[in-house]
Amino acid sequence: MKDGIANNSTASISQARKAVEQLKMEACMDRIKVSKAAADLMAYCEAHIREDPLIVPVPASENPFREKKFFCTIL
Amino acid sequence: MCVCVCVCVCVCVCVCVCVCVCVCVCVHFYLNCNNMKYMRSPPTPEMATQEVPLNETLAHLKTESETLKSKLEEERAKLHDVELHQVAEKVEGLGQFVMKTRRTLKGHGNKVLCMDWCKDKRRIVSSSQDGKVIVWDAFTTNKEHAVTMPCTWVMACAYAPSGCAVACGGLDNKCSVYPLSLDKNENLAAKKKSVAMHTNYLSACSFTNSDMQILTSSGDGTCALWDVESGQLLQSFHGHAADVLCLDLAPSETGNTFVSGGCDKKANVWDMRSGQCIQSFETHESDINSVRYYPSGDAFASGSDDATCRLYDLRADREVAIYSKDSIIFGVSSVDFSLSGRLLFGGYNDYTINVWDVLKGTRVSILFGHENRVSTLRVSPDGTAFCTGSWDHTLRIWA
């Protein structure tokens, strides 16, 4: 039973060591400011928004899902 | 633990004379019993002191981990100079949205659990609880192929980049690849190839940039990268403390990383080559059911059972937006971005789809139609439509 306890401790110690190593690695990361990150996200949106068929609808003839079918729809 | 065995033996001899003989035999078996303890020598002073350093080391490591965590939070907070929606105030608002169900795909006999688009922007593969995997033509709603898996609850399915194969798996703990043939009469199940083996259910799978490699996530808490041809495990990713429910690969321009979300409320970003977890985010209050990269690859969104969707920026290393409303109390099962990244679609357990303005953080539309919870949602590769799968046995294409 004592061996069992020792094994559990070594397992939790190695787990704790791994967690500490992981945190040390994450702490060393180069981060940018949220304002810069937000600006980049916005720039990407602006650049691609015109190509987005769900925001700027393309004519129905070009969107295969929106094109009219041959029967009437019930309103 | 003592085990007593009593044996009584009766013997009768002769017609007139009966002789009974009872024999009781008690046998005691001790397994780790008191007697054994007394027989062992009492703990030596060395053994007693050995335990103390172990406990000290553990406590020491725990405090170090706590200090590092708070230092990490401090570093992240230093760069939190503004909120995304504040920066986005100057952006034009979006107009009114008219999105309707354009196609309904009926044919599954039970809850639809997962779906994926083919790169040809027209075919869809979907899987359901009854073990069926169906390939549809979304333009015509025709079924092109159907496979019956040997297990129920096929929770993951994916289309190969070439469009020539599909991968699926679930409670069988495996991910199998089925090459699709043009011959409709061919039995697809015969050509099945088992690629991945996990020790618990398969929750998600995705081909990498080619048909040759598959990334899987499982209820066993790990993700893994497999070679399709040989079935060999190329890399495994350990770090989640509970079931991993979802994964998404970074858009090809941004390199070899992927993000995974799990029941431990964490979203982890991994390096595919080294197997290392490079970033970890833990702000959700419940299981993360879905993760999806922003089209530029610099951020990702997540949907969780805590009824919120959140946006995490990878370069700022923090959560930058929460998409939630007091009136939304049901969990999010799946999320995806529109082509430009301006819209975030969320499929919810209250049968609706909420459409969010990613930059401003507001809801732009709510879509009704499904008659049970929405379990899966994907935008088509060219962004012209998105498809949802639901527990009401149907898939719907919205545009």
Image (tube, grey):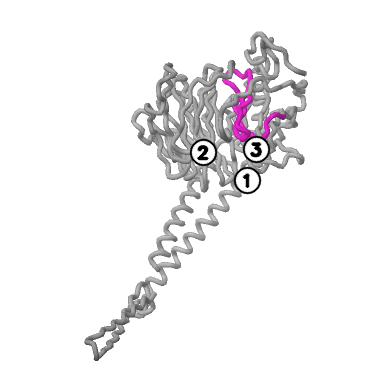
Please name whichever residue, B323 or B27, is drawn nearer the observer in this view of the structure: B27
Question: Residue A56 lies in magenta, yes or no?
Answer: no
Please name whichever residue, B354 or B47, is drawn nearer the observer in this view of the structure: B354
1 and 2 marks in contact (CB < 8 Å)? no
On the image, which quarter does residue B329 sit in?
Answer: top right
On the image, which quarter does residue B366 sit in?
Answer: top right
The three-letter amino acid code for the residue at tag 2 is Trp
Q: Which residue is mark 2?
A: B153
Chain bearing mark 2 = B
Residue B142 image offset from top left, x and y in percent = 55, 19
Q: Which residue is mark 1?
A: B286
Q: Secondary structure at mark 2?
A: loop
Residue B359 image offset from top left, x and y in percent = 70, 28
Please name whichever residue, B36 or B184, is drawn nearer the observer in this view of the structure: B184
Do marks 3 and 1 both belong to one polypeptide chain?
yes
Q: Secondary structure at mark 1?
A: loop
Do marks 3 and 2 both belong to one polypeptide chain?
yes
Residue count near mark 1 (Cα–Cα under 10 Å), binned few <14, some 14–19, many ≥20? some
The three-letter amino acid code for the residue at tag 1 is Ser
On the image, which quarter does residue B213 sit in?
Answer: top left
Disc 1 vs disc 2: which is toward the camera?
A: 2
Residue count near mark 2 (Cα–Cα under 10 Å), binned few <14, some 14–19, many ≥20? many
Measure the C-alpha gap from mark 3 to mark 1. 11 Å
Please name whichever residue, B215 or A41, is drawn nearer the observer in this view of the structure: B215
Q: Earlier in the sequence, mark 1 or mark 2?
A: 2
Q: Earlier in the sequence, mark 3 or mark 2?
A: 2
Q: Which residue is mark 3?
A: B332
- Figure check: A66 above or below B170: above
